[in-house]
């Protein structure tokens, strides 16, 4: 029976599932501190915060680096340069922890269960911090998964994870959480298009308040999340 679903996308559905063991549920990108300090208190606050992260912060930069990794997946020298550039965009130690921990977990499990040449090469290169969006981009190219589809799946997973954190922390109801995701669909779509058109050398971000909250989170007295 023809389901109408491209079988090449099956790995992507698996990788971006909340059940894929990369530990994304343990991170909040400074959202926890923004809620602790009452910068974020409502549904509208949460929506605006995530929209800014998506358009001008880590949400956007992740998509740009993922796109660039997909493009250069079979060029080891370029991959190494991209990883170094991506590291420089981690504005705080917790941002770096979040991306490198998820990247290492994704590389470990995916190289064993969905092996491909770009991931094999990355493992042989023995990099100490395989940042998450770069590794996802390499895996997608290695399995001939459409780049736009990969960015869309990654962006939706990124957004859903932070909404899930906000549901627990603000707190918000499940319906409000879904309303935020719906409200940000066009923003996400526009950001994906922008990321596809932007090379890493053209990238810039500007979410100073989120960066400060991430820094403060490092010494926050009580924490549920690692970032």
Image: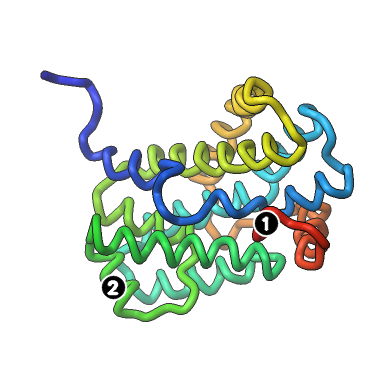
Q: Which residue is mark 2?
A: 121
**Quarter of the image where the C terminus is located:** bottom right
Local secondary structure at mark 2: helix
Q: Residue 134, position in %: x, y? A: 45, 60
- Residue 29 relative to residue 73: left or right: right
- Residue 116 relative to residue 169: left or right: left
Q: Residue 52, position in %: x, y? A: 73, 41
Q: Nearer the viewer, residue 218 or 134?
A: 218
Q: Pointer 2 and pointer 1: residues touching (CB < 8 Å)?
A: no
Q: Would you call the spot at circle 2 few (<14 residues within 10 Å), some (14-19), or many (20 or more)? A: some
Q: Nearer the viewer, residue 163 or 65?
A: 163
Rendering quarter of residue 109: bottom left
Q: Residue 129, position in %: x, y? A: 49, 73
Q: Residue furthest right?
A: 38
Q: Residue 216, position in %: x, y? A: 82, 62
Q: Residue at x 80, y 56 (%)?
A: 213
Q: Residue at x 74, y 57 (%)?
A: 223
Q: Nearer the viewer, mark 2 or mark 1?
A: 2
Please name the colour scheme applied to the rendered image.
rainbow
Q: Looking at the image, is mark 2 or mark 1 earlier in the sequence?
A: 2
Q: Which mark is residue 204?
A: 1
């Amino acid at each position: 029976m023809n389901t109408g679903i491209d079988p090449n996308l099956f790995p992507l559905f698996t990788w971006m599932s909340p059940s894929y063991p990369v530990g994304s549920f343990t991170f909040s990108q400074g959202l926890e501190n923004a809620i602790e300090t009452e910068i974020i208190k409502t549904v509208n606050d949460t929506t605006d915060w995530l929209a800014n992260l998506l358009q001008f912060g880590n949400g956007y930069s992740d998509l740009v680096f993922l796109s660039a990794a997909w493009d250069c997946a079979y060029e080891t020298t370029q991959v190494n340069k991209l990883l170094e550039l991506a590291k420089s965009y981690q504005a705080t130690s917790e941002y770096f922890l979040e991306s490198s921990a998820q990247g290492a977990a994704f590389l470990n499990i995916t190289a064993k269960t969905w092996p491909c040449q770009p991931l094999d090469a990355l493992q042989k290169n023995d990099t100490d911090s395989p940042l998450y969006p770069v590794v996802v981009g390499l895996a997608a190219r290695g399995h001939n998964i459409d780049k736009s589809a990969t960015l869309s799946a990654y962006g939706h997973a990124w957004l859903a994870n932070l909404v899930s954190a906000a549901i627990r922390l603000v707190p918000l109801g499940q319906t409000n959480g879904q309303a935020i995701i719906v409200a940000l669909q066009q923003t996400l779509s526009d950001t994906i298009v922008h990321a596809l058109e932007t090379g890493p050398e053209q990238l810039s971000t500007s979410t100073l308040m989120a960066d400060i909250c991430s820094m403060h989170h490092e010494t926050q007295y009580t924490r549920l999340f690692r970032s």
